[in-house]
Amino acid sequence: QVQLVESGGGLVQAGGSLRLSCVASGRTQSIFRMAWFRQAPGKEREFVAVVTRISDSGHYADSVKGRFTISRDNEKNTLYLRMNSLKSEDAAVYYCAAASRVTGNFDYWGQGTQVTVSS
């Protein structure tokens, strides 16, 4: 099992920045990919960004490309999401997710951290 705990959410003005963190514990060696998803009120959960354990290159949703940066520190078992130029539409609960080598599916999820953007 893998446990994920997010932090770093909060209230920020439009145009501002935040950095989210996600600390993984448990069977972290089984993790192949980690990602950020988000869910706004009344909307479905959507993909934000993903990075693999062995690559520094992230892949992003078009809506955040150029503004968000995903990164990971394998030694600290921590995933980050740097969010710049935040917009009101970025407001959501942000979830960290991990996919194992075995299934390739995002089987592990954190509890989420709230990001609120004021205009």
Image (spheres, grey):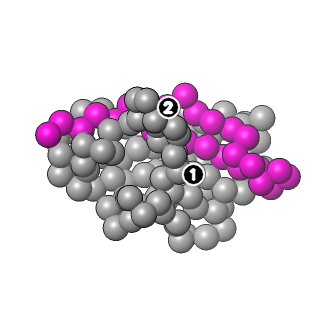
Q: What residue sits 64% from the left and 62% below the top?
A: 52
Tell me where residue 44 appears, x and y as whole percent: 51, 38
Query: What amino acid type should be assigned to the residue bearing mark 1?
Result: Ala
For disc 2, the neighbor class at 10 Å (few under 14, some 14 to 19, many from 20) is: many
Q: What residue sits 18% from the left and 36% below the top?
A: 118
Residue 7 visible in the snapshot: no
Tell me where residue 36 appears, x and y as whole percent: 52, 48
Q: What residue sits 34% from the left and 67% below the top?
A: 66
Q: Is residue 68 left or right of residue 70?
A: left
Q: Verify whether residue 8 appears in magenta.
A: no
Compare residues 49 and 5 and report the one nearer the observer: 49
Q: Which residue is mark 1?
A: 35
Residue 65 visible in the snapshot: yes
Q: Verify whether residue 110 appears in magenta.
A: yes
Q: Is residue 16 left or right of residue 19?
A: left
Magenta extent: 93-119
Compare residues 51 and 21 and report the one nearer the observer: 51
Q: Which residue is mark 2?
A: 112
Tell me where residue 51 appears, x and y as whole percent: 58, 61
Answer with mark 1 or mark 2, whichever residue precedes in sequence: 1
Tell me where residue 109 appears, x and y as whole percent: 63, 36
The correct choice, above or below, for 7 with respect to 56 in the image is above
Image quarter (top left, top right, bottom left or bottom right) of the C terminus: top left
What SS does tag 2 mark?
A: loop
Image quarter (top left, top right, bottom left or bottom right) of the N terminus: top right
For disc 1, the neighbor class at 10 Å (few under 14, some 14 to 19, many from 20) is: many
